[in-house]
Image (tube, coloured by chain):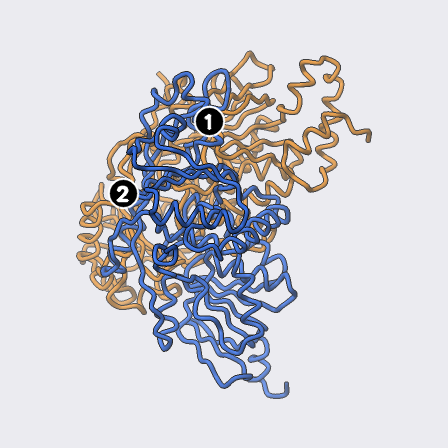
Chain colours: A blue, B orange
C-alpha cells in the first residue's frame, strides 16, 4: 500500500468485471452482486441503447423450445428468475399471453416444439389450419398446422435491463457507462485479468464477456464463428373494423391477441408490439377487446445495421428472431457465471448460436 | 390510524409494496367520510388528488414533484414510459442558461439546473454533464442578439468569439461574417435516463403509475367537482388533472382548439473522420444559425461515439400517428450537407438516424396554464423544440398550479389567452 501506484490499482480491482451492459451482462452483474461479489459492469454506450439486440418493447418467452429440448430447463429457470426480479423491483416485466406457432407438419418448428413439450411434460394444444383460422385472424394454408402453448409470454425487454441495472447498482455494483473496452489482457492462470478501456484500466479475478454483436471482435483470438445478422421489426396499424366486430372480439381478446405471431414460413416474420396493441381498442362496454393499432418504428436500427454491418446477411428468416433466444438466455447467464467461477477459462460466449435447429430435430 | 377498506385497496392499486407514506394515510383519512355512500366507496380507490396525463419529460417530472409533496398522484401514460414515439427519447438534450428566445426563460433554466442536480442526488444517477455551448451566427441575427440580451439581463458570463477564433478552437468551418458566443454553464442531459429516474422516484414515493393505458377523455365538470379521466381500461377521478400530452395535446384538449402543430424532426449520428476533436471534453455542445430559417445543433460524443447533429425546426408538419418514423436518405442528405459545409471533419458515415416530434405554438413559447374553462385542469404543452431542459422546473410549476393554483415562477409568457381572439 505504500506504493501509491498499487494503491490506485487496488481501487480499480474487483472480483468480477462484466463486459457489456445488455441483457446478458446486466443480468450477470445483478446475479454477481446478489452473491456478494465486488462487481464492475462496463458498457461502451449508455445501458438501454439501441445499437445491439436488447432494445425495444417486447420479447417472447416460451417453454416449447423447438430449437433444442435442452433449453427447456433453462427457460423454466428463467421464468422463475424473471418473477423474482419482478418481486425485488416492484416492476411488472413478464406478461403471460400464450403463444401460437404455425408451421408445416414435419417442419422444424412443429416437430421440435412437440418434442420439447413431450420430453419435459409441457402441456400444448395442436391446432389444424381450420381451427387456427377460426380462433385467430390468420390466413393459413390447409397444409399448415399450429401448436398453442399457454405459458408463452412477453417480456418488457428494456425495462428488464433497466431493472437489472437499478438492482445491481443498489447492491453495490460499479456501473461504468459510455466506456468502451479496448483490450482484455488475459494473463497466466491465477493472475488477475486486466481490462483496458478508453478511459482507464481495471484488474479483476474473473471476467464475464457479454458483448453481443461485438463479441467476435472482442474475443478475436478465439475466432468464434459468430455472424451478425440484420433483423427488422414493424409495428402496424391493423384495419380495425373486422377485429372490432362482435364475436371476433372475444376470441381475439387482449390476453390472446398479444401473441406475437411466429410463423414458420419464410415470407413473414411478423411482429406485433404490445405498445398500442393491447391498449388500442376496447369497446365501450369495456370488455377486453381487440384491435391492434399502431405506429411504425424501425428505421434507426436498420440504418445502423446497414451502415455498420454491411455484410450482415439480410435473410428475413422465419423463427430465427435472434432476440427471442437472447432474452431467454439472459437469465440463464446466471448459470453460466457459476461455470466461469470454477473453470479456468471463460466459456466462449453466453449467446450460444446453435445455427441448425432443423438438423438437431432430425 | 385505522385502516379503512379504501386504504387497503389503494395499496394494491398502487402496485407498490412499500409502506404507505404518512401523508397518504392522512389523505385517506380525510376522504374517509365519503365511504358511507356505497357508490362512492367503489369510486374511491380510483380517485386521487391529482392525475397526470402523459408520462414523458413533463408528466414524469410533474408526477415526481407531486408525489414529493405528499399528494396522492396517478400518472397515466398511453405507451410504456420511455417510448420513442413522442419528443423525449434518445440520448442527449442541451441545457443552457443563455436563451435567445426570451430572457424570461433564464430563471426557469436556473431553477431547472438546481432541480436536475437534486434529482441526481436523490437517485444516485449522473444526469447532467457540463460541456459549455458555442453558438454561432451572424451579428444582428436572432441567436447572437437574443442570447447576448439574456446574458446581460441576468448577469450570465459569456465570451464573444470571432470567426478566426472559432476556427482555431473548434473543428468548424465558419464564414468570416459569422461570430460566436461561448457560455460555459451549458451541458447535456441524459434525457431518457432523466425520465426513468423521475418514474422510479415517483413510484418510490407512492405514485400510482399506469402504463399502456390510453386516455380517451377528460371530462371537465363544473367548477369544484372532481375531474373524470376515462382510459381504455378504466375510469378515474381526481381533484386536479395535469395534462402533459406532448404531440397528443391538441387532440386531447380538442375543445380548446390550441394552435399546436406537430413537426417532424430528424437527428443523425455520424462517425467523424477524426475522433479527438469531437470527444466529450474536447467539444462543447454547439449551435449554428446559418440564416434566419436554418438552425443546426449538435453534441460531442455522448452515450455513443458519434457526433449527433440535427436541424432545429424546418421539418414537415405532421400527425403523430402517421408521421414517417424512419430516417430517410433525404434526411441524411440534409444533415450531411450541413456537416460537409460547416464541420467537414465530422462528415463520416451515418451510424444511426432518429426521428422525433416537436409540438409548436405560433410564437414558439410554451403553454403553462390552467384550462380556461375548468380551473381543475392544468396544461403543459407546446414546448416547440426547446422544452426538455426545463422539464424539472416545469414539474415544479405544474405541481404548484395543481396544488396551490399559483406558482412563484414567472410564467406570464405562457398563458393560453395570448392566442385568443
Q: Quadrant of residue A251?
A: top left
Q: Which residue: 49% across, 31% down?
A: A255
Residue furthest right in the image: B1
Please state the horizontal and vertical placement of residue B81, each as a whole percent of the image: 48, 40
- In the image, which disc is placed on residue B326? 2
Q: Chain of mark 1?
A: A
Please state the horizontal and vertical placement of residue B303, each as a whole percent of the image: 40, 58
- In the image, which disc is placed on residue A194? none
Q: SS of the residue at dot 1?
A: loop
Q: Which residue: 42% across, 70% down?
A: A181
Residue furthest bottom in the image: A3
Q: SS of the residue at dot 2?
A: loop
Of the residues tagged 2 and 1, which is closer to the observer? 1
Q: Which residue: 55% across, 83% down?
A: A190
Can residue A341 be seen at all in this image of the molecule? yes
Please state the horizontal and vertical placement of residue B13, each as a whole percent of the image: 64, 31
Q: Mark 1 highlights which residue?
A: A253
Q: Are discs 2 and 1 both within one chain?
A: no
Report, in whole angstroms, how far the alpha carbon at label 2 lies from the one at label 1. Answer: 30 Å
Q: Chain of mark 2?
A: B
The quarter of the picture where the N terminus of chain B appears is top right
> Is B212 situated above or below B269?
above
Can residue B162 be seen at all in this image of the molecule? no
Decide if residue B84 is on the left or right side of residue B265.
Answer: right
| Nearer to me, B249 or A320 | A320
Q: Which residue: 48% across, 84% down?
A: A187
| Nearer to me, A127 or A171 | A127
Q: Quadrant of residue A230?
A: bottom left
Please state the horizontal and vertical placement of residue B396, each as a whole percent of the image: 55, 37
| Nearer to me, B9 or B367 | B9
Amino acid at each position: 500500500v505504500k506504493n501509491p501506484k498499487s494503491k490506485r490499482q487496488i481501487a480499480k480491482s474487483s472480483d468480477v468485471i462484466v463486459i457489456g451492459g445488455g441483457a446478458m451482462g446486466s443480468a450477470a452483474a445483478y446475479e454477481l452482486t446478489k452473491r456478494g461479489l465486488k462487481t464492475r459492469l462496463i458498457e461502451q454506450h449508455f445501458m438501454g441503447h439501441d445499437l445491439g439486440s436488447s432494445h425495444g418493447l417486447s420479447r417472447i418467452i416460451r417453454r416449447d423450445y423447438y430449437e433444442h429440448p435442452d433449453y427447456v430447463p433453462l427457460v423454466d429457470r428463467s421464468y422463475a428468475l424473471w418473477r423474482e426480479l419482478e418481486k425485488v423491483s416492484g416492476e411488472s416485466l413478464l406478461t403471460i399471453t400464450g403463444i401460437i406457432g404455425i408451421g408445416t407438419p414435419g417442419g422444424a418448428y412443429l416437430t421440435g416444439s412437440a418434442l420439447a413439450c413431450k420430453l419435459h411434460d409441457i402441456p400444448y394444444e395442436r391446432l389444424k389450419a381450420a381451427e387456427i383460422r377460426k380462433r385467430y385472424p390468420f390466413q393459413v394454408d390447409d397444409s399448415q398446422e399450429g401448436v398453442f402453448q399457454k405459458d408463452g409470454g412477453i417480456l418488457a425487454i428494456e425495462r428488464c435491463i433497466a431493472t437489472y441495472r437499478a438492482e445491481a447498482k443498489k447492491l453495490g455494483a460499479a456501473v461504468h457507462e459510455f466506456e468502451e473496452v479496448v483490450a482484455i489482457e488475459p494473463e497466466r492462470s491465477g493472475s488477475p485479468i486486466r481490462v483496458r478501456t478508453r478511459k482507464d484500466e481495471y484488474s479483476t479475478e474473473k471476467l464475464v464477456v457479454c458483448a453481443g454483436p461485438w463479441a467476435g471482435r472482442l474475443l478475436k483470438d478465439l475466432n468464434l464463428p459468430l455472424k451478425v445478422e440484420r433483423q427488422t421489426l414493424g409495428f402496424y396499424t391493423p384495419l380495425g373494423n373486422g377485429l372490432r366486430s362482435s364475436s371476433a372480439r372475444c376470441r381475439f381478446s387482449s390476453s390472446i391477441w398479444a401473441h406475437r405471431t411466429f410463423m414458420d414460413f419464410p415470407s413473414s416474420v411478423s411482429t406485433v408490439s404490445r405498445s398500442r396493441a393491447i391498449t388500442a381498442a376496447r369497446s365501450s362496454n369495456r370488455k377486453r377487446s381487440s384491435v391492434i393499432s399502431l405506429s411504425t418504428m424501425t428505421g434507426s436500427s436498420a440504418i445502423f445495421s446497414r451502415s455498420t454491418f454491411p455484410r450482415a446477411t439480410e435473410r428475413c428468416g422465419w423463427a430465427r428472431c435472434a432476440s427471442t433466444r437472447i432474452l431467454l438466455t439472459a437469465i440463464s447467464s446466471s448459470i453460466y457465471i457459476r461455470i466461469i467461477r470454477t473453470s479456468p477459462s471463460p466459456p466462449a460466449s453466453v449467446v450460444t448460436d446453435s445455427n441448425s435447429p432443423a438438423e438437431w430435430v432430425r | 390510524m385505522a385502516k379503512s377498506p379504501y386504504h387497503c385497496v389503494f395499496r394494491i392499486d398502487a402496485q407498490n409494496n412499500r409502506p404507505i407514506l404518512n401523508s397518504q394515510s392522512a389523505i385517506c383519512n380525510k376522504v374517509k367520510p365519503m365511504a358511507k355512500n356505497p357508490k362512492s366507496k367503489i369510486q374511491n380507490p380510483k380517485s386521487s388528488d391529482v392525475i397526470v396525463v402523459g408520462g414523458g419529460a413533463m408528466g414524469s417530472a410533474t408526477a415526481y414533484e407531486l408525489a414529493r409533496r405528499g399528494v396522492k398522484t396517478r400518472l397515466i401514460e398511453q405507451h410504456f414510459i420511455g417510448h420513442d414515439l413522442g419528443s423525449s427519447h434518445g440520448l442527449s438534450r442541451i441545457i443552457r442558461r443563455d436563451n435567445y428566445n426570451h430572457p424570461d426563460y433564464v430563471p426557469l433554466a436556473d431553477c431547472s439546473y438546481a432541480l436536475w442536480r437534486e434529482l441526481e442526488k436523490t437517485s444516485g444517477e449522473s444526469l447532467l454533464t457540463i460541456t459549455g455551448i458555442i453558438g454561432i451566427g451572424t451579428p444582428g441575427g436572432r441567436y447572437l442578439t437574443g442570447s447576448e440580451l439574456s446574458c446581460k439581463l441576468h448577469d450570465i458570463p459569456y465570451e464573444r468569439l470571432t470567426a478566426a477564433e472559432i476556427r482555431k478552437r473548434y473543428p468548424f468551418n465558419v464564414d468570416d461574417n459569422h461570430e460566436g458566443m461561448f457560455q460555459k454553464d451549458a451541458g447535456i442531459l441524459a434525457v431518457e435516463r432523466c425520465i426513468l429516474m423521475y418514474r422510479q422516484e415517483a413510484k418510490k414515493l407512492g405514485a400510482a403509475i399506469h402504463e399502456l393505458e390510453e386516455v380517451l377523455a377528460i371530462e371537465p365538470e363544473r367548477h369544484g367537482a372532481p375531474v373524470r379521466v376515462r382510459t381504455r381500461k378504466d375510469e378515474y377521478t381526481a381533484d386536479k388533472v395535469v395534462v402533459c400530452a406532448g404531440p397528443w395535446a391538441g387532440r386531447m384538449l380538442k375543445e380548446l382548439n390550441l394552435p399546436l402543430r406537430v413537426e417532424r424532426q430528424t437527428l443523425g449520428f455520424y462517425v467523424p473522420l477524426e475522433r479527438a476533436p469531437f470527444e466529450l471534453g474536447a467539444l462543447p455542445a454547439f449551435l449554428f444559425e446559418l440564416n434566419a430559417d436554418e438552425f443546426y445543433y449538435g453534441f460531442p460524443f455522448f452515450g455513443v461515439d458519434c457526433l449527433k447533429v440535427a436541424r432545429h425546426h424546418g421539418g414537415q408538419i405532421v400527425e403523430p400517428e402517421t408521421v414517417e418514423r424512419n430516417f430517410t436518405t433525404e434526411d441524411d442528405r440534409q444533415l450531411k450537407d450541413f456537416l460537409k459545409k460547416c464541420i467537414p471533419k465530422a462528415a463520416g458515415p451515418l451510424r444511426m438516424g432518429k426521428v422525433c416530434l416537436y409540438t409548436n405554438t405560433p410564437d414558439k413559447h410554451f403553454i403553462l396554464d390552467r384550462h380556461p374553462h375548468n380551473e381543475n385542469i392544468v396544461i403543459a404543452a407546446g414546448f416547440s423544440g426547446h422544452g426538455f431542459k426545463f422539464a424539472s422546473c416545469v414539474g415544479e410549476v405544474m405541481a404548484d398550479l395543481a396544488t396551490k393554483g399559483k406558482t412563484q415562477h414567472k410564467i406570464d409568457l405562457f398563458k393560453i389567452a395570448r392566442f385568443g381572439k
